[in-house]
Amino acid sequence: MSRKMYDKFDLDKIDLSKEPSQEEPERQYYFMAKCRKWVREFERKNGHRPCFFTQTFGCQMNARDSEKLEGILSIIGFAKADSEEAADLVLYNTCTVREHANLKVYGRLGYLKTIKKKNPHMLIALCGCMMQEETVVEKIKKSYRFVDLVFGTHNLYKFAELLYNRISSGKITIDIWQDTDKIVEELPADRKYFFKSGVNIMFGCNNFCSYCIVPYVRGRERSREPEQIISEIRRLVESGVSEIMLLGQNVNSYGKTLKNPITFAELLLEVEKIEGLKRIRFMTSHPKDLSDELIQVMKSSKKICHQLHLPMQSGSSRILKEMNRKYTKESYLALVHKIREAIPDISLTTDIIVGFPGETEEDFAETLDVVRKVRFDSAFTFLYSKRTGTPAATMDNQVPEQIVKERFDRLLKEVQEIASEQIQRFEGQTLEVLAEEKNEQLDGYLTGRLSHGIVVHFAGGEDLIGKIIPVKLTQARGFYYYGIQPIED
Ligand code: 5AD
Ligand code: SF4
């Protein structure tokens, strides 16, 4: 953390007898200090610090948001609990991209109710995408009255203020904003890994794919200023990070809404210059916005990883039109061809939805055709899920569940077969691996990742975690490799 940041976080210097500032992030530092005072009183009364437990549902964006929320709790003085049972504060950061994600949260809430009966002082907080839906908040107010705090995606930076409000008033606090153009910088974050981190470069989405709820719950697209992004990455590198993942719903349209517009490729060139940074990843790329400039920057970069997540969603041009994706089967294949020409060893991954309204057997055959032609290293396959409020939800030709399931199984089989063949292409080579964690199944083994995102298990000591080391890929196994560290002469 830089000197400047550290001074700001010296909460004990904040004069709590004054009114809070109206400026951000100063206002939040004030409420963090207020909460810290509460934490100290809690500790005096109970003989231990209050503990928090967080559970994150959904995507990388949510994972990064949770690191920020945990960062705020740490600064306030909370300790981490291993389970809900041991926690004084439980925070669920929710997802609503598919219905299944919502059902999981309701299931967990049922379980929390029984814990709270035994442990009545426990605070329960809910945030994230699902809370941006009016029907969800209504349901919580009516049927889950033991919940203490509810906030959404736009006001997450206000967590300390909202928590203080709940603690001091003793009343349920609900604060959901419809949208915002505000980006609050310089708040703390607790990283899960010391050597890698996500970095938000933009928030929201303007694409309105017809099946997708994200634009409604994450709001309009807004980009962070490049200077802010660069200085955050510099700080991360100073504190030991060697790999970053630039995060946005559609990174290829980064910078368009800034006062001084810059392209995503230009941002990458700036990030590349940061000394000490070794690996750059990014997600997600929308095929319609992926520029030639970006391909060239990726090709000439020494740090950008040879992996690209390029969601295709469907292989049928007709369905793609209904999905409002703004590309066709042919243009998607042409783009893949162009990328592979420039970077032949690139690892391509994708997202595919099966059973979008009106999908026929012919449409599905087109999807299988693209899968066979592109040969993805891996693909996330999803059953279409109807999301209230999206245009696709009211389309009258919804595909029967049985047919969708049957297609899904066929697709999964194809995707897995191709992936296990694809992965063999590096067998026998020695490539750089970032050692990420101890392998929980195999004693004495570590698990790491290639630049291509592929997982490698190899024998090694824990002192290697966070380092990039050469590993010989001895055996491909379905989705991953076994490897050995080559013996130096
Ligand atoms: N049903 C199924 N999958 C969906 N996705 C987004 N919305 C839906 C939906 N309604 C998938 C898309 C997207 C990924 C993050 O989730 O494939 O790329
Ligand atoms: Fe959803 Fe499409 Fe935006 Fe991705 S690009 S978040 S699929 S609307």
Image: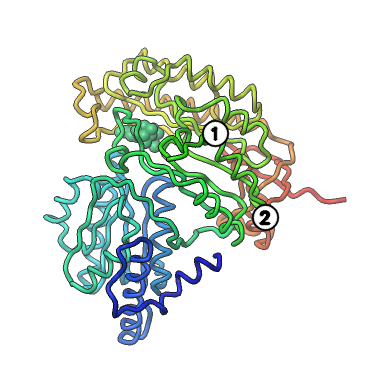
The residue under the point 26% across, 71% down is 122
Please rate how many residues cluster around mark 2, counting C-alpha atoms within 10 Å: few if below 14, some from 14 to 19, many from 20: some
Q: Secondary structure at mark 1?
A: strand
Residue 115 sits in quarter:
bottom left
Q: Is residue 426 above or below residue 158?
A: above
Q: Is residue 471 visible?
A: yes
In the picture shown, does residue 381 fall above or below 158? above
Q: Amino acid at mark 2?
A: Lys
Q: Residue at x 65, y 59 (%)?
A: 444
Residue that carries the numbered disc 1 in the rendered image: 308
Q: Which residue is mark 2?
A: 467
Q: Amino acid at mark 1?
A: Leu
Residue 165 lies in quadrant: bottom left
Quadrant containing the N terminus is bottom right
Q: Is residue 437 visible?
A: no
Marks 2 and 1, the one that precedes in the sequence? 1
